Image (tube, grey):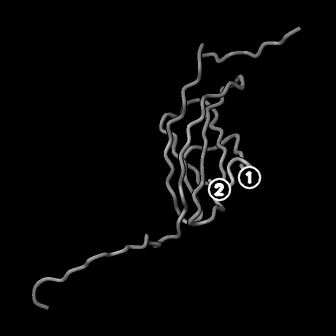
Amino acid sequence: MATTRPTSSIGGQLPTPTFTAAAGDSQVTLNCTNASTYTLHVDYAANSTWPASMTTDSSYTNNSAITGLTNGTTYRFDMTFVDEFGNTSVPATVTAAPAAAGSTVPLFVHNLRLMGAL
């Protein structure tokens, strides 16, 4: 006998999360802009090791920092909504690279030409 899984109480597919990532020192904070009553499920790993070393947070709290990340490494974050029946949305993906406070991006200047009196 086949079993059926209950469907979402809203009668259709769950919406796809819309979220942004804000990088900080050894951390990234995710902000889901269309968060609702669904549970936020986040998978993340360094881009170079995705999905082999993926970490899962099955009850992510919106706007909280994911800590312990390596500065200068780009991470991939996939977020899905999960409803009370276990149904999941299509995942949304962003990337972010944490950086130490006060760190700068190298600037390269080519063909600099000074004009006028010094």
Task: Give the amino acid at mark 2.
Answer: Ser
The spot of residue 16 in percent (x, y) is 54, 30
The spot of residue 56 in percent (x, y) is 71, 45
The spot of residue 88 in percent (x, y) is 66, 28
- Up the image or down, 80 lies above or below 55; here it is above
Q: Residue at the bottom extreme?
A: 118
On-image quarter of the N terminus: top right
- Up the image or down, 6 lies above or below 105; here it is above
Q: Which mark is residue 53?
A: 1
Q: Residue at the front extreme?
A: 111
Label 2 environment density (alpha carbons within 10 Å; few <14, some 14–19, many ≥20): few
Q: Quadrant of residue 111?
A: bottom left
Which one is in front, 113 or 12?
113
Label 1 or label 2, whichever lies nearer to me, is: 2
The spot of residue 50 in percent (x, y) is 67, 49
Q: Quadrant of residue 93?
A: top right
Q: Residue at x 52, y 62 (%)?
A: 24
- Identify the residue position indicated by label 2 in the image: 48
Which one is in front, 73 or 38?
73
Task: Give the amino acid at mark 1.
Answer: Ser
Counting labels gives 2
The reply to whether dot 1 and dot 2 touch (C-beta < 8 Å) is no
Q: Residue at the right extreme?
A: 1
Q: Which mark is residue 27?
A: none
Tag 2, which secondary structure?
helix
Along the horizontal axis of the image, is 118 left or right of 70?
left
Which one is in front, 113 or 62?
113
Q: Residue at x 10, y 89 (%)?
A: 117
